[in-house]
Image (spheres, rainbow, N blue to C red):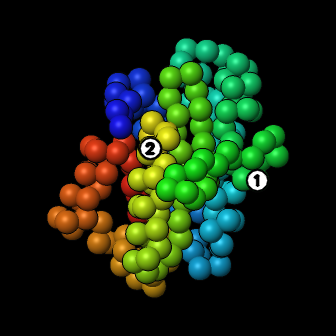
Amino acid sequence: MIKLKKTTKRLNLINEIIKKMKEHDIFSESVSRKTNTENMIQKSVFSMLDKRLPEIISKNYGITERNARKQIKYNFIFESKTIKPVPSFNFFATNHRPDAILELRDIRIAFEIKKGEKGNSIRSGIGQSIVYSTQYDFVLYFFVDTTPGCDINSSKHGDKEKELIKYLWDNYNIRFFVV
């Protein structure tokens, strides 16, 4: 698989999207992570992003926010948006579908948000992200840590964890975050 080049323009777009996602209140330490379901978190984050993307697209592509809004209407797709469903694709004789996608003229981004407090949730999301990287240029994977002491979030600073995060980015164009 040939990965799309990480040009400055693409990286700026991705970094601005990530920044907006990370700023969402639902990822705040003051929000109870246990009470919100994974679907509630996804809906909240993607609905906010749906409103913020026109500004980001306009800035990065030099088009008006009005034109960016038109592009987003049909090209940013997530489950609770009623325009059209997130398309699935077949891989290893199984259908796969990211939580959301953004398709612009020169970039295709898949989004995955998982919630959990055990290793199987992290592994599941990493595996899904790798599969999505076969179909999309970039994958943004957010893992919402629900451990009582945010142990998983704290562990992301370990050498092995940082190495894996870098490996996913360098080899698969997957940006992985624990929030």
- Mark 1 or mark 2, which is nearer the start of the sequence? 1
Residue at figure coordinates x 46%, y 68% from the top left: 124
- Give the residue number, with chain letter if any, for mark 1: 80
Nearest the viewer among 114 and 123 is 123
| Residue 172 position by quadrant | top left
Is 126 drawn above or below residue 69 in the view shown? below
Task: Residue at 69%, 47% (x, y): give it.
Answer: 86
> For this view, does 36 lie left or right of residue 114?
right
Residue 107 in the image: state x and y as whole percent. Answer: 50, 29
Q: Residue 32: x, y in percent?
A: 59, 76
In front: 156, or 90? 90
Question: Quadrant location of the N terminus?
Answer: top left
The residue under label 1 is which amino acid type?
A: Ser
Q: Secondary structure at mark 2?
A: loop
**Type of amino acid at the residue the image marks with label 2:** Thr
**Which residue bears the numbered disc 2?**
134
CA neighbours of label 2 inside 10 A, class few (<14), some (14 to 19), many (20+)? some
Secondary structure of residue under mark 1: loop
Which residue is situated farthest in the front direction here? 93
